[in-house]
Amino acid sequence: MLKKDEESDAIQMIVFLGNPGLRYHSTRHNLGWMLADTLEKTAPLSWKSKFKGLIADWRLDSNHTLLLKPQTFMNQSGRSVQAAMDFHRIHPESTLVVHDDIELDFGTVDLKAGGGFAGHNGLRSIAKCIGVSSFLRFRMGISRPGHGNAAGFVLSSFSNEELCRLPVFLDRSLEILIQCIQRGFKETQPQYQKIQVMV
């Protein structure tokens, strides 16, 4: 296990979860990648193919953060995350994973350190590959399906009503993500405990 500088609360890497391919581009399960796309509209990023994913450097003020979009499909995301963490010697507690979450209502953000997986195969894969589940979470609510199974729901497109509200959800989520970088996760987390951001 890599040693973490206990004096630092800096996020060294942000992982945006999603599935590659046009078929999945606009699905609920790709909400993490949608936030990466929103970030890219505000900051010039140069993505490179490495670690079974796409990786870029994000410089915000004096902060330097690695961004990773695994390209291994959701249930194998851990292979990409582990490769990047090992190469750059990044500790799990300095890694923030951005992902969709059916346990939260659409438009809700929750910052969480460690925890379970709530059926999310991307989180499960990461924990399995790196050996711990103590990485940080940026949970973005997509709500539970009213009927049908969860697997089909997360791989479906947003409703028309949700699509109308999605840009605001993404913009507000980006503001919170920026706070996590500028202020540190521990200081930012108490303000965003299952908070509906579209008010």
Image (spheres, grey):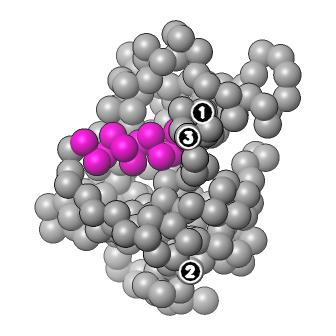
How many numbered marks, from 0 up? 3
State which mark lies toward you, 2 or 1. Answer: 1
Q: Residues within 10 Å of mark 2 (few under 14, many from 20)?
A: some
* Amino acid bearing label 1: Thr
Closer to the camera in the image, 146 or 138: 146
* Amino acid bearing label 3: Leu
Q: Do the residues labelled 1 and 3 touch (CB within 8 Å)?
A: no
Q: In this view, does 84 lie above or below 155?
A: below
Closer to the camera in the image, 147 or 61: 147
x and y percent of residue 193 in the render?
51, 39
Q: How crowded is mark 3: few (under 14 residues within 10 Å), some or many (20 or more)?
A: few
Residue bearing mark 1:
27
Q: Which residue is drawn at 43% across and 70% down?
A: 49
Q: Is residue 185 above or below residue 153?
A: below
Q: Residue furthest right?
A: 148
Mark 3 to mark 2: distance in Å?
25 Å
Q: Residue furthest left?
A: 61
Mark identifier at residue 83: 2
One can see residue 133 in this view: no
Residue bearing mark 3:
22
Magenta range is 30-41
Q: Which residue is drawn at 41% across and 27% down?
A: 169
